[in-house]
Image (cartoon, grey):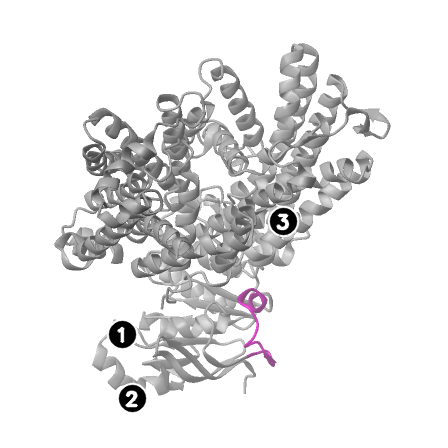
């Protein structure tokens, strides 16, 4: 069996397991899992840029929130239906990531992290500033009757779970395909040695910009999906914390692996869920996990698995 | 008379008031092996850096295949068929040998995974690294990494192949293999070689260009250069491993 | 007049805090995201020390001014030894680790200092500003006990900050410790080869940087209250200052702190604070994009 076949089987098996879990798990965990899958889409978008291209953005909440508010405000403030609102959310995310990418990619390394952080902070403050329309910190609820896709009500537990699963599956398979394609291989080459890649005749600037746009757009789609499926948009999702979360998830699960984001989100979600019965200061756990990870397992759970056991892991 | 594939006019690089290269006029004959020599610090690497576009020239002109490429960024120049190997080994240390060479080959053959694979297999065969295809490049010995670097150049099927001190750190037998390899390449491929090892220069070069203190000092056949008084003075003055 | 004096106070505190960030970046090439938390811990410790001493507010304040920065410096040195040193100061990983540190410090403070995630409001202002009532007292002030008595403390803040910054400058340029730091900054490998214990130097520099933030915080505490989330704004502002001043340039940092401190007041006169922050944040991002060496920094090579 070739490595490509193995990873195909692994990816489809993952999706199949997620589908089966719906019938096995109690309602509480089904709800959690819907959320985890949507957040995993966000993490996968981040991972494409951080894990595969080697660019660390500390401002991805900007893209997530752009998708979220693009959809949310189209529905809430302009009374649009779900389908065109989804489109609006995606277009907003594309434009935003293109602009941010174009500007931020003029810098490298630490400056890139700070610039993306600053843009995201400006975005968060903008949400607050236009509080009259965005409802600021408080956020707004998208009315339940409006949340329909192609005539299907997606507010029910079942339809929501499968909507999340379909989205997850599409992005999951698309990224798995992308990172094996010539484009994805070039991104990895840039991560490993940008100067070398340029001197092999690749336009690394264009590749990096495309990576930011695809990554930002996926993050925006996740934001739009979150607003639509859970019916809420708020400024919390634009805070620095929501830029740090995907970094945490991806580091935890394994940067530059296809499965890492899902593993990281699920692990972190339940870690916080379980610990919140002990302490309210759940960010303490996030902090400790971050430090411990950078110290002892910089490659994350899936990364360590790949290193120790399954070198073929995608 | 062979045709000229690449020429430079008045190529100059200034670093904070110091000229690393000053008004270098240079011509490269198609299909030949040209060696660029000169004492340490003569500006050889800077010069080929400006040809490949890796280093931006302060002023001057580079013409490749009848086209002025002075304004093109590095990756556009590489696409025209210029391959470049780094003086300080620069491979993808975290990836396999196969993938290293595949990245190099993929830019031209990207549409077909089969063609890329075939190219990688043939290039690795050519340089004698076939049995190590699945190793991680960072685990290779220094000499093997140098050879891999050359393989990455070959995989691009270059029109002009620039090698910056390719034999540095290679063992005796590896140097011999290298000499055989590039002699076989010449004819179809034009080769520009920066080389300190004068034995390699004399065994391979059809033409030698000497840089000293950032300027052109002499240019001619190996015999002419050997007889050149100015070159002898420059080398005796600084005494490199010539 | 009063507004520009307010600005000068902000600038003085900011200069101290940003200087800490700047030194750490300059010498160690580490971007310390947890810098604002060291500031916050400094403020919280000032409150703890002052309320423990309790004798007279003046004694309490002086004790806080000595103890808080020392403790914060030691915490920072421990963090450097335990975490950063083991990461070999890899830029990406240290950023991630200091983000982790940020959460750890913030949440630990939340759980000990204010477990309800609400700002604890000790009668701090009066307690600590009282001695400055007395200190600055000279017949003239008695006529306006409010306005000028507060400014007398603020005046002290400005003078104290200037004194500390001058001391720091002397330390960096005139002393052996400064020479060692600068040597390490220039080329840590060569410094190591010349027998400079680079690891030790890094620990002290990291401690010094955090200590400076804590000094700024102790000075600010009588004006603002200590709160577990108070580190956020100083962090952002320090970043802005350090970036505009040119990463790692000490005079640039002071000038930029002064500019930002003064303009922060001025901008918010014309715009709402949120809009002012948006403009400032975007401006910094664009400075980094188009002039990465900072407004006052020089292009390297």
Q: Earlier in the sequence, mark 1 or mark 2?
A: 2
* Mark 1 chain: B
Q: Is residue C45 left or right of residue B220?
A: left
- The residue pinned by badge 2 equals B230
- Judged by depth in the image, the label closer to the viewer, 1 or 2, is 2
**Nearer the viewer's eye, disc 3 or disc 1?**
3
Alpha-carbon span between mark 3 and mark 1: 55 Å
Q: Which mark is residue B242?
A: 1
Task: Please give left or right for residue A288 compared with residue A35 in the image.
Answer: left
Considering the numbered disc 2 on the image, is that residue within a helix, a strand or a loop?
helix
Image height of C193 relative to C71, above or below: below
Q: Which residue is mark 3?
A: A97
Residue plotted at (82% across, 35% down):
A81
* Helix, strand or loop under label 3: helix
State the residue lying farthest toward the bottom. Answer: B229
Packing grade of label 2 (10 A; few <14, some 14-19, many >=20) is some
Question: Does residue C41 appear left or right of residue A31 in this picture?
Answer: left
Q: A263 and C28: which one is in front?
A: C28
Q: Is residue C109 above or below residue A204?
A: above
Callout 1–callout 2 Cβ contact below 8 Å: no
Viewport quadrant of the N terminus of chain A: top right
**Mark 3 vs mark 1: same chain?**
no
Of the pair B10 and C218, the residue shown nearer to us? C218
Q: Is residue A157 magenta?
A: no
Chain under label 2? B
Q: Which residues are magenta?
A: B63-78
**Disc 3: host chain:** A
Q: Is mark 3 in CB contact (under 8 Å) with mark 1?
A: no
Q: Picture coordinates of residue B64 (x, y %)?
A: 56, 77
């Amino acid at each position: 069996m070739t490595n490509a076949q193995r990873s195909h089987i692994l990816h489809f098996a993952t999706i199949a397991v997620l589908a089966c879990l719906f019938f096995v798990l109690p309602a509480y965990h089904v709800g959690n899992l819907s959320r985890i899958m949507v957040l995993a889409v966000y993490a996968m978008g981040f991972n494409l840029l951080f894990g595969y291209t080697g660019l660390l953005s500390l401002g991805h909440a900007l893209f997530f929130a752009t998708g979220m508010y693009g959809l949310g405000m189209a529905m809430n403030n302009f009374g649009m239906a779900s389908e065109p609102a989804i489109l609006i959310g995606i277009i907003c995310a594309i434009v935003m990531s293109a602009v941010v990418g174009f500007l931020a990619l003029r810098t490298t390394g630490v400056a890139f992290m700070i610039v993306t952080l600053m843009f995201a902070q400006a975005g968060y403050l903008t949400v607050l500033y236009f509080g009259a329309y965005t409802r600021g910190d408080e956020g707004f609820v998208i009315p339940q009757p409006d949340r329909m896709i192609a005539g299907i009500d997606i507010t029910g537990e079942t339809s929501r779970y499968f909507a999340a699963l379909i989205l997850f599956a599409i992005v999951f398979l698309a990224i798995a395909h992308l990172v094996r394609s010539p484009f994805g291989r070039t991104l990895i080459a840039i991560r490993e040695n940008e100067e070398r890649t340029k001197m092999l005749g690749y336009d690394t600037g264009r590749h990096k910009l495309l990576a930011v746009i695809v990554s930002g757009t996926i993050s925006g789609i996740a934001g739009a999906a979150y607003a639509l499926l859970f019916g809420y948009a708020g400024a919390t999702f634009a805070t620095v914390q929501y830029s740090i979360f995907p970094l945490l998830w991806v580091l935890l699960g394994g940067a530059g692996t296809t499965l890492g984001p899902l593993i990281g989100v699920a692990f972190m979600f339940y870690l916080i869920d379980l610990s919140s019965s002990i302490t309210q200061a759940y960010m303490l756990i996030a902090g400790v996990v971050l430090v411990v990870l950078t110290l002892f397992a910089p490659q994350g759970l899936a990364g360590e698995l790949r290193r120790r056991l399954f070198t073929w892991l995608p | 008379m062979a045709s000229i594939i690449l020429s430079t006019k008045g190529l100059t690089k200034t670093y904070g008031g110091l000229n690393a290269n000053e008004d270098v006029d240079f011509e490269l004959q198609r299909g030949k092996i040209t060696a660029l020599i000169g004492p340490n610090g003569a500006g050889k690497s800077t010069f080929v850096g400006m040809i490949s576009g890796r280093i931006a020239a302060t002023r001057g002109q580079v013409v490749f295949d009848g086209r002025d490429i002075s304004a093109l960024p590095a990756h556009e120049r590489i696409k025209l068929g210029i391959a470049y190997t780094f003086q300080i080994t620069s491979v993808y240390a975290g990836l396999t040998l196969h993938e290293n060479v595949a990245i190099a080959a993929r830019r031209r053959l990207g549409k077909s995974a089969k063609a890329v694979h075939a190219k990688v297999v043939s290039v690795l065969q050519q340089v004698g690294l076939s049995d190590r295809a699945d190793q991680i490049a960072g685990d290779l010995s220094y000499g093997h990494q140098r050879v891999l670097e050359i393989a990455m150049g070959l995989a691009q099927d270059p029109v002009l192949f620039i090698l910056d001190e390719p034999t540095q750190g290679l063992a005796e037998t590896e140097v011999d293999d290298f000499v055989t390899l590039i002699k076989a390449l010449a004819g179809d491929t034009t080769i520009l070689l920066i080389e300190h090892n004068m034995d390699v220069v004399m065994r391979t070069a059809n033409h030698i260009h000497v840089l000293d203190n950032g300027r052109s000092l002499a240019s001619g056949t190996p015999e002419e250069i050997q007889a050149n008084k100015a070159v002898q003075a420059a080398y005796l003055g600084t005494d490199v491993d010539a | 007049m009063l507004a520009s004096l307010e600005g000068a106070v902000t600038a003085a505190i900011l200069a101290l805090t940003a200087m800490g960030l700047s030194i750490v970046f300059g010498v160690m090439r580490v971007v310390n995201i947890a810098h604002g938390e060291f500031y916050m811990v400094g403020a919280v410790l000032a409150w703890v020390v002052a309320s423990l001493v309790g004798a007279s507010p003046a004694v309490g304040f002086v004790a806080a001014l000595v103890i808080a920065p020392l403790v914060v410096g030691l915490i920072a040195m421990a963090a450097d030894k335990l975490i950063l040193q083991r990461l070999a100061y890899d830029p990406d990983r240290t950023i991630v680790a200091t983000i982790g540190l940020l959460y750890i410090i913030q949440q630990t403070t939340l759980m000990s200092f204010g477990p309800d995630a609400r700002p604890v409001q000790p009668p701090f202002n009066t307690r600590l500003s009282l001695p400055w009532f007395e200190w600055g007292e000279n017949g003239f002030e008695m006529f306006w006990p409010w306005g000028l008595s507060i400014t007398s403390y603020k005046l002290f803040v400005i003078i104290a900050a200037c004194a500390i910054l001058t001391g720091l400058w002397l330390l960096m340029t005139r002393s052996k410790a400064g020479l060692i730091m600068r040597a390490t900054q220039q080329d840590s490998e060569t410094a190591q080869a010349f027998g400079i214990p680079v690891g030790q130097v890094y620990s002290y520099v990291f401690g010094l940087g955090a200590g400076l933030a804590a000094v700024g915080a102790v000075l600010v505490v009588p004006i603002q209250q200590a709160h577990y989330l108070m580190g956020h704004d100083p962090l952002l502002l320090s970043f802005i200052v350090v970036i505009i001043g040119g990463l790692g340039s000490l005079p640039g940092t002071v000038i930029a702190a002064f500019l930002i401190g003064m303009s922060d007041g001025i901008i918010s006169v014309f715009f709402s604070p949120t809009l002012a922050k948006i403009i400032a944040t975007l401006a910094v991002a664009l400075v980094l994009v188009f002039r990465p060496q900072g407004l006052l920094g020089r292009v390297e090579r």
